[in-house]
Image: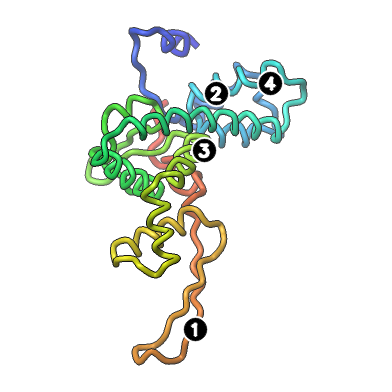
Amino acid sequence: MKILEDSLRMNSVYYVGPLSETVFSKLLTKYPRLNQADIVDKVTNLTNRVPRELVRLSDAIEDKEDPITNEILEDCASTRSNSFYIVVWEYFLGLHEVSKHKFYKALLKAFLGNTSIADFEWDFVDLGLIYRIKGDLNSTMNRILCPPVQKALLKAFMDMPLTKDIMDRVNLGNISGQEFEQALLIQFITSNKPIVPTATDIVNANPTSIHWTSNIVRLSDFQTNRSAKAKE
C-alpha cells in the first residue's frame, strides 16, 4: 500500500503493468468489496492485475450499494474506457500527418500482439495505456494495459479516417494489395462473426466457402503476458 500511496506523488515514477497472480491476490485482500468470490474473476480481468486500475475501480464503486455485481463492474469499466478514449483521441488529433499514419499502424500491430519497442512514441507510452515486456531474444514488446484501454483504442482506431477510407474503398472494389491486407486485419480485429470468403481451385472452378474466425479482440488471448509474470 505504501507503494500505491507514493505513486501518487508528482516526483515519483513507477512501472505500470500487471502484477503476478499471487501478488495481485494479496493486494486484492485490501479491497474486500472487490474481493468477493462471485466477482473476483471479473475484477481480475477488467484490471488485468494492474494496481492503478484496481484503485480506480475501488473508487468507482465507492457510492454503489452492496453487493457489487458483474454488471456494476462492467458499467464502471465502460466509464473508464470512455475516459481513456478521450485521452487517446486528443493525442491522435495533436499528431501531424506522418505521425498519425505511424500511430495507426502501431495500433494495428498492437491489436495483433506483434509490436516492438519502436512502434509507439515515448509521449504515447507516457500516457500509461500500454506497458512493455521482454519478448523472445530479449526483445521489448508493447502490450495494451487492460480491457478498458483496449476498448478505447479499438474505438479510436475505428474512428480514424484511415480506417474509414480503407473500408469505403473495399465497398467500392477500389483497393490495393497492401490495403486489402489491412482491410482483412481490420475485419479480424473488429468482427466477432466469422469471415466467409469464397475460394476456387487453381483453374478458378469448384467454388467453396472458407470460414475464418478470430479471437484477436479478446484481450485475455493476447494482451496479458501470462508466461512473463512478475517475480514475487
Label 2: state its secondary structure: helix
Residues 171 and 80: in front is 171
Front residue of 189/15: it is 189
Q: Label 4: how many residues lie within 10 Å, few (<14), some (14-19) or many (20+)?
A: some
Cα–Cα span, label 1 and label 3? 36 Å
Residue matched to label 1: 208
Residue 114 place in picture, x, y as percent: 33, 48
Q: Nearer the viewer, mark 4 or mark 3?
A: 3
Question: By what rule are the colours in the image chosen?
Answer: rainbow
Which label belongs to residue 54?
2
Work out how far the residue at label 1 is from the one at label 2, CA to CA, in angstroms: 49 Å
Point 47% across, 29% down: residue = 86
- Percent coordinates x, y for residue 223 in the rendering: 43, 42
First of labels 3, 2 by sequence position: 2
Q: In the image, is 230 to the left or to the right of 213?
A: left
CB within 8 Å, label 4 to label 1: no
Q: Nearer the viewer, mark 1 or mark 2?
A: 1
